[in-house]
Amino acid sequence: MSRLLAPVVGALTEAWAEIRHHRLRVLLSLIGIAVSVGALATVFALADYQRQYSAEQSDRYGGRVATIAVTASGTDGTAVDPDALDAQFARVAERYGFGHVSRVATLTVPVQAPDGVRDTTTRLMDVDYPVMHRLALAEGRWFTSEDRELLAPAVVVSEPLWDSLGRVPLAQHPTLTLTGPLAGTYQVVGVTPRQGQWDTEHRVDMLYDSYRDRVDAMPADLIVQREVWVPPGIVDEIGPVLAMDLRAAASSGVEIAVNRTDWAAQTGAGDAALAFELVTGAIAGLVLLLGGLSLVNVQLVAMRQRIREIGVRRSFGATSVRVFTSVLLENVVATAVAGAVGIVLAIVVLRTPVVLSMFTGMQDVPPFPVRAALLGLAASVLVGALAGILPASVALRVKVIDTLRF
């Protein structure tokens, strides 16, 4: 083993010594390689950022992978009893051991604002809903199971509504007054952030059970959707079984629909991120190729200035294979170092506030992808090998007599 490794280690050591001796020339020729590798690694990392950002945005609407939604509707004028369906759904959820389950419904509730009573969009949910939909807060907290027992039930308001209430700090326990069927005082425990400067929606979120405890009966036209978050590996099997169990227990004239709502169930999910990765990766690869051609040109010019050096080495017994390998490895080692520098630059760029501001609101920032680092290093080594073949071939033809002519 030592006999096999000794020539390789010797060639690498010699190549590194030559790089240090010609460091100015090497530095100038490898700037393009480092920038290109950095761009290539950044592209693949940004693709992961974009994929994660898009997934989180989709999770806020359709639920995490894999979310199943159950809806019930009456046929031929049959009314759906939401309380009976809740009990039935709870039994099924307990039987299958679902970890995250939530009911969700949207209705309009009159809210006492400083400028008068306003009909305000209100979402009813269970404590698991914010987790299932990656809902973030600008201030405060989401609901807990104990909030149902509070004398002043907990609510979460949107930031525009909080603004209209004077942005009273949550530590001072601000309250919200509702009128109509839900008349009473409610404690504001959290604030959802604006989606953008254009977002002026006044919205109230409250626990489904808090709403149910304060009304005599659920509105006949209220559509209640029940959601379940299950492991992706069993979603294809659990969906039909869940539908069958619920339909078997449903009363006559009630239709049960079970569908996946998460983005992973949609056809073509992730195509946009893949297209971005391919297009920008091709551009970065082209830049890397141009950098390799520039390196070939610089090395060929430098090789004419090193004919005396190589001739002297041949006079001291250096074989053709040793000369060829030495020149080739000079390029490979140099481009590998440039590739490592480029990857470090890519990591620094990805952690700058400018880049992170492009993905505002992303909760789980992906780590720098290993595939981007490996691909960048592999590309730099490959370019170094290809760029070194021609100069190494020129060095191979140098003879001892050439030292007297140059």
Image: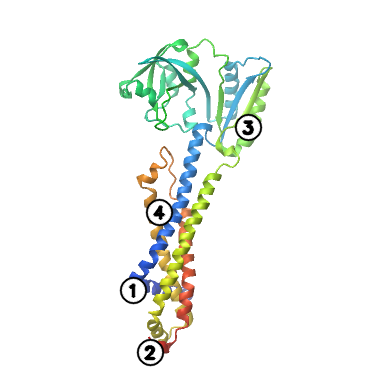
Disc nearer the start of the sequence (3/1): 1
Q: CA distance from mark 3 to mark 1?
A: 68 Å
Q: CA distance from mark 1 to mark 2?
A: 23 Å
Across and down, in percent, residue 398 comes to: 45, 84
Q: Is residue 250 above or below residue 311?
A: above
Of discs 1 and 2, which sits in the foreground? 2
The residue type indicated by label 1 comes to His
Residue occupying image coordinates x 58% and y 28%: 69
Residue occupying image coordinates x 65% and y 25%: 245
The residue type indicated by label 3 comes to Gly
Q: Which residue is mark 1?
A: 21
Answer yes or no: do the residues labelled 4 and 3 have beta carbons within 8 Å?
no
Query: Dot 2, crowdedness within 10 Å: few (<14), some or many (≥20)?
Result: few
Query: Dot 3, crowdedness within 10 Å: few (<14), some or many (≥20)?
Result: some
Is residue 102 at least partly visible in the picture?
yes
In the picture, the disc for residue 8 is none
Q: Quadrant of the C terminus?
A: bottom left
Q: Which residue is mark 2?
A: 404
Disc nearer the start of the sequence (4/3): 3
Q: Which residue is mark 4?
A: 346
Across and down, in percent, residue 291 comes to: 44, 64
Of discs 2 and 4, which sits in the foreground? 2
Answer yes or no: do the residues labelled 4 and 1 have beta carbons within 8 Å?
no
Indicate the secondary structure of the residue bearing disc 2.
Answer: helix
Query: Dot 1, crowdedness within 10 Å: few (<14), some or many (≥20)?
Result: few
Residue 101 versus residue 170: which sits nearer the camera? 170
